[in-house]
Image: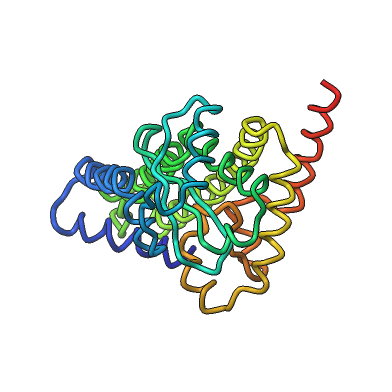
Amino acid sequence: MVLLGVLYVFFIGALATAGIGLLGIVVVMGLFSFAQLFFSDKLALRSMGAHVADEDEYPELHDSVGRLAQQADLPKPQVAVADSQVPNAFATGRSKSSATVCVTTGIMETLDQDELEGVLAHELAHIKNRDVMVMTIASFLSTIAFIIVRWGWLFSGGHGHGRGNNQAPIWVAILISLVVWIVSFLLIRALSRYREYSADRGGAIITGQPSALASALMKISGRMDKVPKDDLREQAEMNAFFIIPITKGFIGNLFRTHPQTEKRIERLQELEREMETA
């Protein structure tokens, strides 16, 4: 987290040194965010080594995605498959019409049909809720807040180097900007966890089987401990996308993008009871 904050400071500082004003820096960061929004699907698939799968290659998978998309009132997204032992799935794309659902070969080998459809419905709920766009906008606003707090001092002349004025020294601006960045970082993680709960609920409603998704989460979570460490390291960068993130140790749990699996299962079981008594 600290290294990312330092990276922000150096990058924005380089732009400022090059003579770009505060507005220009905001515009540049905005362009980066929009590039992320428009190309995140291709980057995500490439980082996973995934390929768009034809219907002839995976007919049952295409049939499930198409049927569930119809139930969710969504256009059928592209279907991609990654050859990986890690049992996982994710959805990406800036809009409902340009979305992709990707599953690994590991998850197809681990889950039965009902469980796999529960996971696919969860990913379709992410698409329906426009979560890729929401998280991109949230990250952009966090970055803008950081820029304004940190660099607004400089562009307003708030250097405070012995001029006899009452303006705070530059280290105060650095400290405040660091606090703003850390708080926004934690808030974005909280937003991500909330949207995972929302996708769980949405996916369970699409299939009408909360227990199937709960069972899938338990199976996937159990399989994670058996996946070779090399495979886990290779795919750790995709944590924000996965239905079950790869988390190790205290820091991994503190800054997790997903709620704990046990809590997700508890909420799904509550939803199951609600649906049975409705």
Q: Position of residue 179 (x, y in %)?
A: 51, 53
Q: Position of residue 23 (x, y in %)?
A: 22, 40
Residue at image position (40%, 46%) is 55
Residue lying at the far top of the rendered structure: 278
Residue at image position (13%, 53%) is 19
Residue lying at the far left of the rendered structure: 19
Is residue 124 rendered to the left or right of residue 264?
A: left
Residue at image position (16%, 50%) is 20
Is residue 263 rendered to the left or right of residue 167?
A: right
Q: Is residue 145 visible?
A: no
Image quarter in which the C terminus is found: top right
Question: In the figure, 2 relative to 37: above or below?
Answer: below
Q: Position of residue 202 (x, y in %)?
A: 62, 33
State which quadrant residue 148 falls in.
top left
Taking depth in this image into account, of 143 and 227 the one nearest to the observer is 227
Taking depth in this image into account, of 35 and 213 the one nearest to the observer is 213
Is residue 232 rendered to the left or right of residue 48?
A: right
| Tag count | 0
Residue at image position (73%, 38%) is 210
Q: How is the image coloured?
A: rainbow
Q: Is residue 67 visible?
A: yes
Question: In the figure, 38 relative to 1: above or below?
Answer: above
Taking depth in this image into account, of 97 and 78 the one nearest to the observer is 78
Q: Position of residue 201 (x, y in %)?
A: 66, 35
